[in-house]
Amino acid sequence: MNLDKTKVMFNDHIIPGPVIVESAVLEVVSEYTYLGQIIQLGRANFEKEADRRIQLGWAAYGKLRHILNSAIPQCLKTKVFNACVLPVMTYGAETWTLTALRPYYTITFMTNRLTTDEIYKRRLEKNKLRAFSAICSDENEKENENPKFKVNNTKNATSKVSEQEIHKIEHNPFNLASHVRLFTLRKSEKKSSMPEPFITNDPRTICDIDKTFYKIIEGRPLRQFSDIKVYMRNIRDITLFRANIAYRRDQIIKIDTALRDEYTEYEKIETFFTETKSNFVRFAQECYERGKIVEALANAKSIELDKMVDQLENYSFICVKIRNQLSGLLATFENLDKYRGFLFSLSPMSWQNKFMSHFNENIIDVNYLQENITSAETINGLKVTLLKLQKVSPELFFDEPKQLMTICDDLGKQCLNYMKINVFANNIIVQVMKYRGFYRKIVQDEVFELEEFIEIFQKYVVWMEDKEKENKAIFERILLNEFHELFASYDTAKLFTCVQYVNTRLFETPEDPKDSLSLLTGQLELQYLELTSQLDCLDQEIVKAATNELFAEDIKMMKMAHKAQRELKECDLLSKALYTSFEPPRYKRK
C-alpha cells in the first residue's frame, strides 16, 4: 500500500477526521484522479469528469485540426473524428450519473467543433442528437425544417440567411455551388511549351555551321545522292558530334585541374602529419621522463612513511602496555580507598569529626586518571601524588582486631533490638489489614474517576497531536525547497562525501551509513585540537618551512598536471583535424 498515493474522501453523512495508517496521516481530498477519471462524492459526482472529458476532446480535436480543416472529403473527416476524438470523450461514460443539462453541454461541444460554414449549411438544432458524419435521418430533417436558432452568415456567403435555401449536403464537395464549396480547384496557368529544335527548311551550306570547313569545301553546298532531308540530317549529326567532343574535353580539363589541386593538398597534409607525429613523439618522451621522476620521488616518500609507521606501532604497543599496568594500580588503589571509608564509618563520631578534613582530601582522582591516562599532565600529576603518598602518615582508630570485634557485637545487639520492634509492629499491621478491603474500595472508586479523567485528557492529547502533525506537514511543504537546499542539495552531498573521505583516511575506519556531517566535523575538530596542542612544543619556524616545502611540491605537481591536460586537449584537437582532413568532402565539386 503506497501511503503517498492513498487519499481519503468523506461524504456529507460522516464528520471529517484524521485517518492514521502505520503512524502516517492520510491526506483528505475532495476529488482524486484514478485510472484517468476524476472521482468525487455527492450529487454532482461526475460533473468535473464530464468537463474534463470535454477538455480532453477539445485537445484531441486541436491535435487533428490540420486534418479536419484540410481540403479532403467530409466522409474521411468523419472517420478520423469518430476514431480519434469520440473515444477520448466517451472514456468511462457508461458509469456516469448525469443530470438533464449535462447531455446538452456535450452536444454543444460537438456542434462547436464544426466550422461556421458547416454550421450555416447544416443548421444544427438545440438539444437534439444528430449524427456528425453529414448523414442524418428523415425524422431529424423534418424536425429541423424550422430551426429554433440560426447562425450568422460567414464571409463567403453572398446572400442573407433567410433568403438561402436549406439543402442536404453530399459527400462530394464538387457538387456544391462555388460560393459554398469547402475548397475549389486551382486555376493553373498553362505551361509554356518547350522551344522546338532548330530545323531549317531551306538548303544551307556547311560554312554556316562550321566556319573552319570552308578550307576544304570553300562554302559550296553539300549535296547528297538523296533529297534535302538527308543533307539536313548529316549537318545535324556533325554539329552534335563536335559538341559532344567539346563537352568531353572540358570534362577532362576539369578532372586534371581537380587532380592537381588534390595532389597539392595531399602534399600539405603529408608534411603537416609528419610534423605533428614528430611533435607527439617528443611530447610523449618528455611526459615519460617527468613521470619517471615523479614515480621515483613517490617511492622514496613511501619508504620513509613505512619506516615512520613501524616506529609509531612500536611506540603505541609500549604505551598500551604501560597504560594497562597503570590501570591495574588504579583499581587496587580504588579498592583500598573503599576499605578505608568502611573503617572510617565504623570509627566513633568524635574521631570522625577530628580527622574529617584528612578523610575528605582526595589525593588521586581515579575517574580523571582513567579518562586521561596518556596525557603528559596526568603523568606529571602521578609523580606529584607519589610524593604526597610518601609523606602522608597512617591515621587509624582500630589498632587491634579486638576493637573491631567489640563494635561488631554492638551491631548484633542493635539488630536484635530491631527484631523485637518489628514483632511489636506486626500486631499493629494485622489490625490495619482488617480494614484493608474497605479502604481498597474507596481507593478503587477514586482510581476509576481518575482513569476517566485520564482517558479524556488522552483523547485531547491525541487530537492535539493530530493537529500538530497537520501543521507540521503544512510547514514541511512550505519549507521543502529550503531544507532540500540545506540537507539534500548537490553541494551538501559533495561536502559530506569529502568530510567522510577525510575521516576514513585519517582514522582508518570504514564508512558508516549512520555518519552525519556534524559528527564527522566534530571528530575532525577534536583531531585538529590534539594536533595543535602537540605542535606547541615544536619549533614554529621548522614547521612553517616544512609546510611550505610540502605545499610547494603540491603546487608544482598541480601546474604540471594542468599543463599536461592542456597539451592533451591540443593533441585531441590536432588528431580530430587530421581525421577530418582525410575524410571525403561533404559537398560535390562542380
Image (cartoon, rainbow, N blue to C red):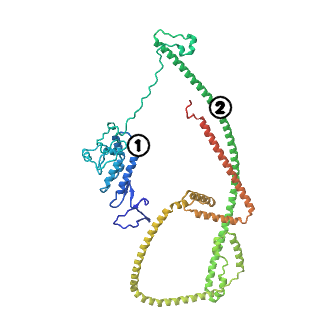
The numbered dot on residue 66 is: 1
Other-residue count near label 1 (Cα within 10 Å), few / some / many at <14 / 14–19 / ≥20:
few
Q: Is residue 392 above or below residue 506?
A: below
| Badge 2 or badge 1: first in the primary sequence | 1
Other-residue count near label 2 (Cα within 10 Å), few / some / many at <14 / 14–19 / ≥20:
few
Q: Quadrant of residue 509?
A: bottom right
Q: Quadrant of the N terminus?
A: bottom left
Q: Is residue 222 above or below residue 455?
A: above
Q: Quadrant of the C terminus?
A: top right
Tell me residue 76's x, y (percent).
35, 41
Q: Which residue is rendered at x = 70% and y = 81% of the image?
A: 392
Q: Which residue is rendered at x = 49% and y = 63% of the image?
A: 476
Q: Which residue is rendered at x = 47% and y = 8% of the image?
A: 225
Tell me residue 466's x, y (percent).
44, 68
Tell me residue 212's x, y (percent).
57, 15
The numbered dot on residue 267 is: 2
The numbered dot on residue 165 is: none
| Residue 532 appearing in the image | yes
